[in-house]
Amino acid sequence: MGTMGKKIGHIIGNVVSLFISLIVLIPLVVLLVNSFKTSAEADRMTLSLPKQWMFENYSTVIEQGKLISSFFNGLLYATGSVVIIVAVVSLAAFVISRNMKGINRALYYFIISGIAMPINNVSLMKVMQAFHLVNTRFGIILLYAAINIPLSLFLAYGFIETIPREIDEAAVIDGCTPWQLFTRIIAPLLKPIVSTLFVLDFMAIWNDFTMPLYYLNNSAKWPMTLAVYNFFGAFQNSWNLVAADIMLTLLPVLVVFILGQKYIVGGVSAGSVKG
């Protein structure tokens, strides 16, 4: 009876997993199929195969949707923000983890409280305007960095806590200054969490839609996610072109996720339990 119960449990688990997978995959399949249809066929957004495969939809989207410049905009925002996040978080997490008391403790909990706190776009707009950062590439990079630092610090702190303090003590005895201790000893050990932060933050920033919409009012500075919005406005009934645009926007982050998924699992697992 126990064996039979386990088999039934496995079957139920597989069915539930299959159902959840279909919930995620079906919308992607619908977009993929409709991206090769004519405008009239794509209006219904069904799973039926196109009567005539319109491969030229993708070239039309790239040319008319200005996806080349949008791609490089999105790449600049994601890469620039991730570099700032990794540099700031690595240093902050090391200092805080090695002296978790007083102002450091208060500062740590203050920063990670941003994980749960919602973004007030009205106040944020006032701040951005005061520093003349609205509609600037540098401003959106700093904005993305600020938004993603809380969770990144939380993950980095958990990882650095697993690094034995005896390593620090041995390095100091050998004559390392604090900066040499971090750059020569600690930084090489942070490769798993740095890789994790890079992949997670890159995907989050690349997929974001609202921040560029609010704070970039020049379409020449829009990333690919907003190029979809702009393209939809220009071709309101061309759902085939909209679907093709979305598929091209998903492609870069899908590649990053496939290449970096092992780092996500490894980095988060390594920082989840103190050694």
Image (cartoon, rainbow, N blue to C red):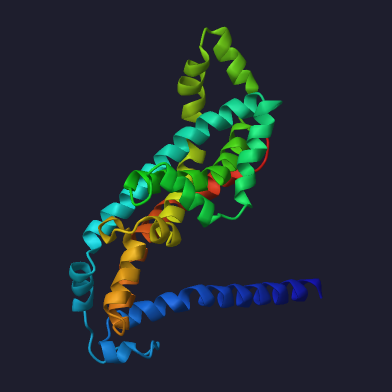
Task: Give the position of the C terminus as an image quadrant.
Answer: top right
Question: Measuring 62% from the left and 28% from the top, which residue is drawn there?
Answer: 96
Residue 62 vs 88, above or below: the answer is below
Q: Where is residue 254 in the image (x, y as percent from the top left)?
A: 39, 60
Work out whether residue 271 can be spotted. Answer: no
Image height of 29 relative to 271, above or below: below
Between 131 and 73, the residue placed more toward the observer is 131
The structure residue drawn at horizontal position 52% and vertical position 25%, both measured from the top left corner, is: 186
| Front in this rendered view, residue 22 or 73 | 73
Does the rendering let one see residue 44? yes
User: Splitting the image into 4 quarters, where does residue 109 fall?
Assistant: top right
Q: Residue at x 30, y 79 (%)?
A: 35
Horizontal side, residue 22 vs residue 41: left or right: right
Looking at the picture, tell me which residue is in the foreground, 43 or 139.
139
Expressed as whole percent of the image width and height from the top left, the position of residue 60 reads 19, 74
- Write the residue at 80% across / 71% down: 2
Q: In this view, does 271 lie to the left or right of 149?
A: right
- Quarter of the picture containing the N terminus is bottom right
Q: Where is residue 118 in the image (x, y as percent from the top left)?
A: 59, 55
